[in-house]
Image (tube, rainbow, N blue to C red):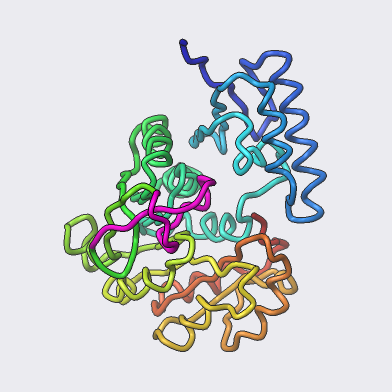
Amino acid sequence: MIALPPIDYDRATGVLTGASMLERCAALAFKAGARASSAWSHRGFGLGCQVVRTVLPPRDIKVMLNDDAAFTFPYGDGYWSLLLDSRYHYERDIERFFLGIADADYTLIDCGANFGYWSVLASSRPYGAHRAIAIEPSSQNFSRLTANARLNGDRFTALQRAIGAARGTARLSGHKHEQFSIAGNGSDGEEVAVIALDHLIDDGRVPAAGRYVIKLDVEGVEIDAIKGGRRLLATDSILVVEDHGQDRAHTVSRYILEQTPLKLFMHDPLTGRFEKLARLDALDRIKQHTNVGYNVLATASPFWEQRIHNLGAAPARAER
């Protein structure tokens, strides 16, 4: 069977091209479902996409995130199809952060890159055209990641590895592409190579004295990843890491505050700013939804602390 060319969708204009009548109707359903489910953090949206996809031919969609950023995924994917709603912003607080540092000179280290969303954006002109290394363990996801790299002129590097505390191997567990993890004890999953963040220096992939934004979305091994990146985190770097809403103990943030020299920041919807967190009780208020991930920023760098302060106040809400 000859694969169909991807459908094209421009988020800026809302124009969908190359779609059949059935696929256009599906797009309306995806948009309506995204809009309706936003009231409860998009619970049920993925299931709705799964139902709609049963009547669609297998096909990709290419979404123009901006005029210099193209991102492809399977049409009807239950995670990424939220992008068909022009009002939806994936990780809105982090989008604001990346736009606010577009003029800074840094390299993005995108760990758990999935299909490469943030590497595509950070390397695009509106975000500063930064160098990026996208690291993803799953061969299934890595195929999508490299396709998105090619689609954008191979302007970022893709590396198939898992991130942990030390070199080795592990097995992936999970059934959804956005939730693959080496944290479980699955024996049937794909075997993957594991490296520590500091090995990026040892292996010559990044210089020891660079400036970095390190995004960790590694599904349960965040603390191991931090432990394996002490030298990298001691550089002029800032860590963007998930503290999931269902974790009421705030395990990742607690570790950062109590076991590392890093200062912790998080976007506070009450002030519209990234606020410094000296205590964890603020997270009890901010983390309102148990089915979404929240991001914290952690740094020991005066440069990055000043950049966070300079972001100022603006209406924003973390959304996933």
Seen at 71% across and 29% down, the residue is 52
Count of numbered labels shown in the rendering: 0
Camera-nearest residue between 185 and 209 = 185
Above or below — where is 267 with respect to 63?
Answer: below
Q: Residue at x 41, y 39 (%)?
A: 140
Q: Nearer the viewer, residue 67 or 267?
A: 267
- Lateral position of residue 57 relative to residue 36, left or right: left
The answer to which image quadrant residue 47 occupies is top right
Residue 100, percent across and down?
Answer: 54, 59
Above or below, 94 relative to 118: below
Quadrant containing the C terminus in the rendered view:
bottom right
Vertical relation: 19 (above or below) 205: above
Q: Residue furthest front?
A: 187
Instruction: Name the side, left or right, on which 24 lies relative to 177.
Output: right
- Range of residues picked out in magenta: 168-188
- Side of 316 where 108 appears, left or right: left
Q: Main secondary structure of the magenta part?
A: loop
Question: Residue 285 placed where, x, y %?
Answer: 73, 78
* In the image, residue 151 above or below residue 127: above
Q: Spot the residue most to the top.
A: 1
Is residue 149 covered in magenta? no
Q: Seen in the image, is 140 located left or right of residue 285?
A: left
Q: Where is residue 198 in the image (x, y as percent from the top left)?
A: 25, 67
Q: Where is residue 20 in the image (x, y as percent from the top left)?
A: 68, 13
Residue nearest the viewer, comparing 190 with 279: 190
Residue 8 vs residue 191, the one in the foreground: 191
Query: Is residue 178 on the magenta stretch?
Result: yes
Q: Which residue is drawn at 42% across and 56% down?
A: 186
